[in-house]
């Protein structure tokens, strides 16, 4: 059965876990799956005229990855990209792809992410995105950015108090040689939880609203730059 043609599909990256950080039981790439993308796609359809299709999850080594200009990776402080995955991600970004990374915290997890990206895009550092960067204004004019919490930071549904974030939220990116943002970095925050729990009464509406505006700007930027 052929899939319906669409302008955008939410594609989640499958990846190999760090050996010493296993224990989730089903792969860290699956965190918030599939509710996060189901809810986000609903928002894209409601708030834009972008024709969205059903979401996918694919390993980087699958050739179909080149059919999609936008991929999402969560828990990247727990990934351990193989040489084949590293080479494929480099090729994907060089060919115009756009990667969003999300839901990782603190210096140890950032170091794991940074080490992988140093191999994927050597010499292209992770930098703060300036307030006037096009990515904040390509559709929604996002001038106020604040912490987007996971449920664990709010103390919802776990039977114990809220966890303290590892540090302030950082809105960062990696650019290619031409200055285009090719990796959007959501560090010390959990945008995926805000999508996943968009219909949960206890989850703050302000965080959900920012997460949707942010994600949609990423989509539009990836399709127009």
Image (cartoon, helix red, strand yellow):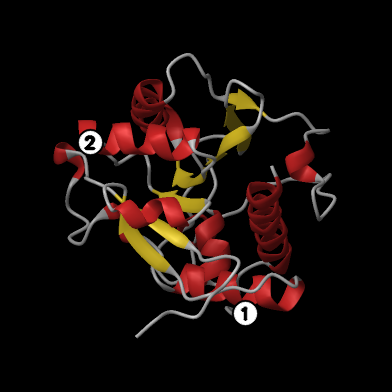
Outermost residue, left direction? 19
Quadrant of the image for the N terminus? bottom left
Residue for point 40% across, 72% down: 34
On the image, the x and y values in percent for residue 26 come to 20, 62
On the image, the x and y values in percent for residue 9 come to 52, 66
Outermost residue, bottom direction? 1
Residue for point 54% across, 72% down: 197
Residue for point 33% across, 38% down: 88
On screen, residue 61 versus residue 131, left or right, reads: left
Vertical arrangement, residue 135 with respect to residue 201, above or below? above
In-front residue for pair 118/177 = 177
Quadrant of the image for the C terminus? top right
Q: Mark 2 or mark 1, which has the lower sequence index?
A: 2
- Mark 1 residue crowding within 10 angstroms, few (<14) / some (14–19) / many (20+): few
Label 1 residue SS? loop
Foreground disc of the pair 2, 1 = 2
Give the Cα separation between the discs numbered 2 and 1: 43 Å
- Quadrant in which residue 219 is drawn: bottom right
In-front residue for pair 52/170 = 52
Whether residue 168 is visible here, answered yes or no, is no
Residue for point 17% across, 53% down: 23
On the image, the x and y values in percent for residue 170 come to 61, 35
Identify the residue position indicated by label 1 in the image. Answer: 201
Vertical arrangement, residue 194 with respect to residue 101, above or below? below
- Mark 2 residue crowding within 10 angstroms, few (<14) / some (14–19) / many (20+): few
Whether residue 145 is visible here, answered yes or no, is yes
Label 2 residue SS? helix
On screen, residue 219 versus residue 167, left or right, reads: right
On the image, the x and y values in percent for residue 15 come to 27, 48
Identify the residue position indicated by label 2 in the image. Answer: 84
């Amino acid at each position: 059965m052929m899939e319906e043609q669409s302008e955008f599909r939410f594609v989640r990256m499958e990846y190999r876990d760090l050996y010493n950080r296993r224990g989730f039981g089903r792969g860290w790439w699956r965190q918030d799956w599939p509710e996060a993308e189901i809810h986000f796609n609903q928002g894209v359809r409601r708030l834009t005229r972008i024709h969205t299709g059903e979401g996918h999850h694919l390993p980087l080594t699958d050739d179909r990855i080149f059919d999609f200009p936008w991929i999402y990776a969560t828990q990247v402080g727990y990934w351990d990209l193989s040489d084949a995955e590293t080479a494929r991600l480099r090729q994907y970004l060089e060919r115009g792809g756009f990667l969003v990374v999300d839901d990782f915290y603190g210096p140890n997890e950032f170091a794991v992410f940074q080490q992988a990206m140093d191999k994927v895009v050597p010499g292209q550092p992770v930098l703060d995105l300036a307030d006037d960067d096009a990515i904040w204004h390509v559709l929604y004019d996002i001038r106020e950015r604040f912490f987007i919490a996971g449920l664990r930071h709010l103390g919802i549904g776990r039977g114990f108090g809220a966890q303290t974030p590892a540090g302030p939220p950082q809105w960062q990116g990696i650019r290619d040689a031409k200055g285009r943002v090719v990796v959007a970095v959501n560090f010390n925050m959990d945008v995926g939880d805000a999508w996943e729990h968009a219909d949960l009464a206890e989850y703050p509406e302000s965080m959900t609203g920012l997460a949707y505006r942010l994600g949609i700007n990423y989509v539009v930027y990836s399709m127009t730059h």
